[in-house]
Image: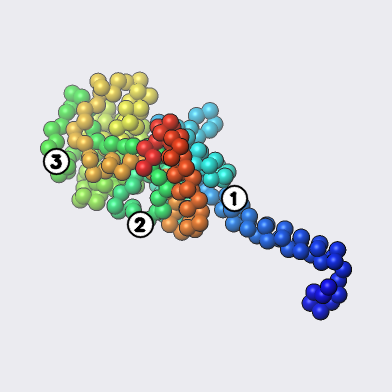
Amino acid sequence: MRYGGARVSRRAAGAWRRACRIALLALCLLPAFASGQSIRVVTEEYPPYNYAKDGDVQGVSTAVVRAVLAEAGIEAPIQLMPWARAYDLALHSENVLIYSITRTPAREDLFKWIGQVAPSAWFLYALRGREIPLKTLEDAKAYRIATVYQDVGEQFLLERGFDPKLNLQSSNRYAHNYEKLKLGRVDLWIANGVVAAYLVREAGDDPAQQLKAALQLHELGGEGLYMAFSHTTSDAVVERFRRAFEALRRDGRLARLGAGGS
């Protein structure tokens, strides 16, 4: 038997073919291994969806993300950081998975969307005893509003003409905004309803006694909270996660975790 003009034994030829098969298999497995090693999962302190507890990242949305990672066969640590930093990483870096992120028309083409990890509803809240009668969003332009830097609530208000200097008081942490509202430093607080109730309870207060929903923001909360990849992430990686998400949705595991599963 000849390979490249040289005579070799059948045993040597067999060994060569086996080596080629092993090398080919390794090349086939490399993209999956590489994508698993390079994926970076980022989120923020946003209880009860995602938050740090006992040295680990927990929460309703985190449980969904971990389930999708496991179904996709990928191991990746989850990093908590301020939202502005997580959002910037997801905008400008490859292979970054971000959650819990609200899906809006303005963000639609900025990310590659995987699926909904939780439903969501947003409100402008006033403090009870200092109620503010709002009929439209335009009415809120007469007031000071607590926001979180570069989160969807702040983006929503800026897109609708709110003045960042006159109307908005931006923080890096959601808990700071409830403190501002209680102390009278702001008139209104834009927040996800579940998060607002959680933070008020964490502060030792009763949400029903403290908060008054001045206006529900239907345009903002409709799509819910998602997990999404940075736009420069390869389509192969994104499709792998979409298939994993769909498998969890079909067999009911997402519903049992409390996710919307859209």
186 vs 84, nearest the viewer: 84
Q: Depth-wise, is mark 1 or mark 3 nearer the camera? A: 1
Q: Which residue is mark 1?
A: 37
Q: As rendered, which of 53 and 103 lies closer to the eye?
A: 103
Task: Determine contact: label 1, label 3, CB under 8 Å.
Answer: no
Give the secondary structure at mark 3: loop
Q: Which residue is mark 2?
A: 109
**Which quarter of the figure is the N terminus placed in?**
bottom right
Going from N to C along the chain, the mark reached first, 2 or 3, is: 2
- Mark 2–mark 3 Cα distance, whole angstroms, equals 29 Å
Query: What residue is at 14 percent from the left and 41 percent from the top?
Result: 136
**What amino acid is found at the position of numbered circle 3 in the picture?**
Thr
260 w.r.t. 201: above or below: below
The answer to whether one can see residue 253 in this image is yes
Q: Residues within 10 Å of mark 1 (few under 14, many from 20)?
A: some
Left or right for 31, reference 123? right
| Quadrant, the C terminus | top left
Task: Give the crowd class for mark 3: few <14, some 14-19, many >=20 residues within 10 Å.
Answer: few
Res. 136 mark: 3
How far from the left and from the top, in percent, is residue 93? 48, 56
Q: CA distance from mark 2 to mark 1?
A: 26 Å
